[in-house]
Amino acid sequence: VVSDSDLLPLASTDDRPHSANAIPYEQNGALIESVQLLDAAGHAVDQLCHAQNYQCVFRVFFMLDAANVRFAILLKTLEDIALGGAMSATSIDKGIESVPRGSVIEVTYGFVCRLNPGAYHINLAVYGSEANVEYALHGVRAALTFRVATWSNCPLIGSVDFGFQAKHVLVESR
């Protein structure tokens, strides 16, 4: 249950997602807004550096009462290939039990940038459930678009840095 101390003032509509490619889905009791990507110092950024800490922060305004609320983030390539993401709770019964109408919840997903140089999207969603059936309250595809900066001596292939380290040994010479 969300208490009054957890509620935040509603942001202005000028703070809605600012990706030119953002595609908001139909609202079904909630609205995702005020989406930002922040660096470790709390500054809004749209270019990330490899191996640095970042946060995706957004607010969700609840136009209707909601139960068993969970939030989701998914990072994708511009070609719409899912790279990875997270849910705020591992199952429906571990979500926020009850969120009253008129509430605003700020959600923060912290992460270390393990992406290789290129451009990416962040998709966001909020879910609720009724009678143990989960459904989307709102979602925004490509809520933010960002770039990962190129760095020198980047020997990586693909989109994600898995931390591979090459080791090779000559075993025979013919």
Image (cartoon, helix red, strand yellow):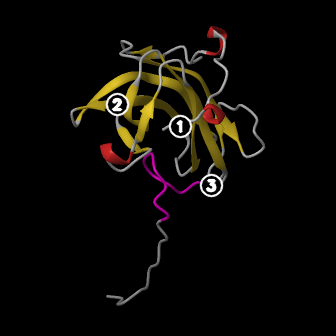
Can residue 75 be seen from the camera position used here? no
Q: Amino acid at mark 2?
A: Gly
Quadrant location of residue 148? top right
Residue 45 in picture, x, y percent from top left? 69, 32
Query: At 78% across and 43% down in the image, what residue appears?
Result: 41
Disc 3, SS: loop
Q: Which residues are magenta?
A: 153-163
Q: Earlier in the sequence, mark 3 or mark 2?
A: 3
Nearer to us in this view, 140 or 94: 94
Quadrant location of residue 10? top right
Mark linked to residue 51: 3
Q: How many marks?
A: 3
Q: Amino acid at mark 3?
A: Ala
Residue 155 in picture, x, y percent from top left? 53, 57
Disc 2, SS: strand
Disc 1/disc 3 C-alpha distance (Å): 14 Å
Residue 150 in picture, x, y percent from top left? 63, 43
Report the residue marked by disc 2: 128
Nearer to us in this view, 2 or 10: 2
